[in-house]
Amino acid sequence: MSAEKVLYICQEITPYLPENEISILCRNMPQAIQEKGCEIRTFMPKFGCINERRNQLHEVIRLSGMNIIIDDNDHPLIIKVASIQSARMQVYFIDNDDFFHRRFTVTDGEGNEFADNAERSIFYARGVIETVRKLRWVPDVIHCHGWMSAFVPLYLKKAFADDPYFKNAKIVFSLYNDDFKQKFKQDLGNKVLIDELQPADFSVLGKTPGYLSMMKLAVQYSDGIILASDQVNKNLLSFVQKSEKPCIVGSEENGYQNYYDFYNTLSEQK
C-alpha cells in the first residue's frame, strides 16, 4: 500500500516564522510531497509573534471549542488556518491563550527557555490529534518535526492505538540539531498522563526529563526516523542505532524523493 495521505506536525514553518533549518524544510517538503500526488494536512503552533492579519489567519469555529486537560487544568483549544497561496497549501494552527500568546516562541527576550515548554508540547500534540479526528481525516503517514511534536508518537501508539483515524498510520520522526538546555520538572509524568496511558509507557523520560529523554521517547514510538540535520545529538544517534528503527538521511534532491520513498516503504510494512 502506498502513502496517499500525509500529516505533517511541524514546530516551525516559514513564512510564519523566520527561516531556519526546520522552518524551511517544513515549508518546502509538504508542497513537494503534495505535488507527487499525496493529500496533505499541515500543522504548527500559533506562536504569539505570528502576525494574524498579515498572514490572513482566521479561526475555524467548527474545529475549536473543546478543552484539553493537562494535570487537572482545562486549556481551551483554538484552531486557526491560513493558506500559502504559492504552494496551494493550507496550514492549521494550534492556539491557546495560556501557551501560545506570548511574543516569543520557546525562549523569552533574553534567551531563557520557557518553564512550561513541556506542557506546551503536550498541548500541541494532543491538540493536533483531536483536530485531525474532528476533520475525519485518516492519514497513512504522520511526519513529526522538532521537539515540540515529541509526544505525538507516544499518544498515537499507546492512547490512540485502536483509534480508526490512526491505527494504521506509520509515524515518522525527523531529528534536528534543536537541543535545548532546560530540564523539566519531575512531575512531567503527571502532565503527560491520560487515562489510556501507564507510567511505564513513558519511563524513558526518567527522573530529570529534558531534550534527550523527550527525543528518545519520540524515537521509541516512531516507525521510522529521518536524520534531517548534519549535527544531531550524538547520544541520540546512538539511541537510534540501538533501536534498529528504519532510518534514512534526509535529502532535498529530486523534490524530497527519498522522503516519499521512505513513506511508501513504511506503508507497505504490516
Image: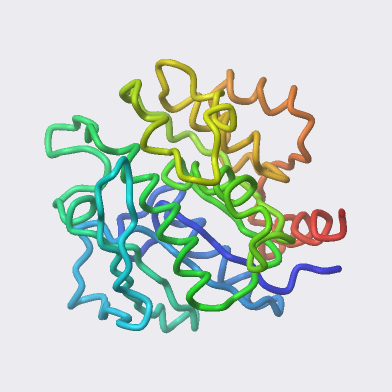
- Name the residue located 19 percent from the left edge and 30 percent from the top edge: 112
- Tag count in the figure? 0
Is 127 on the left or on the right of 88, as rendered?
Answer: left
User: At 69% from the left edge and 41% from the top edge, which residue is drawn?
Assistant: 249
Q: Residue at x 87, y 54 (%)?
A: 270
Task: Indicate the position of residue 152 as horizontal and vertical percent values.
Answer: 52, 48
Q: Position of residue 65 (x, y in %)?
A: 29, 73
Colour scheme used in the picture?
rainbow
If the image is split into quadrants, where does the N terminus sit? bottom right
- Residue 134: x and y in percent read 48, 75
The residue most toward the front is 195
Residue 38 quadrant: bottom right
Which quadrant of the figure has residue 181? top left
- Seen from the viewer's position, the closer of residues 15 and 122 is 122
The residue at the far top in this view is 207
Q: Is residue 244 left or right of residue 216?
A: right
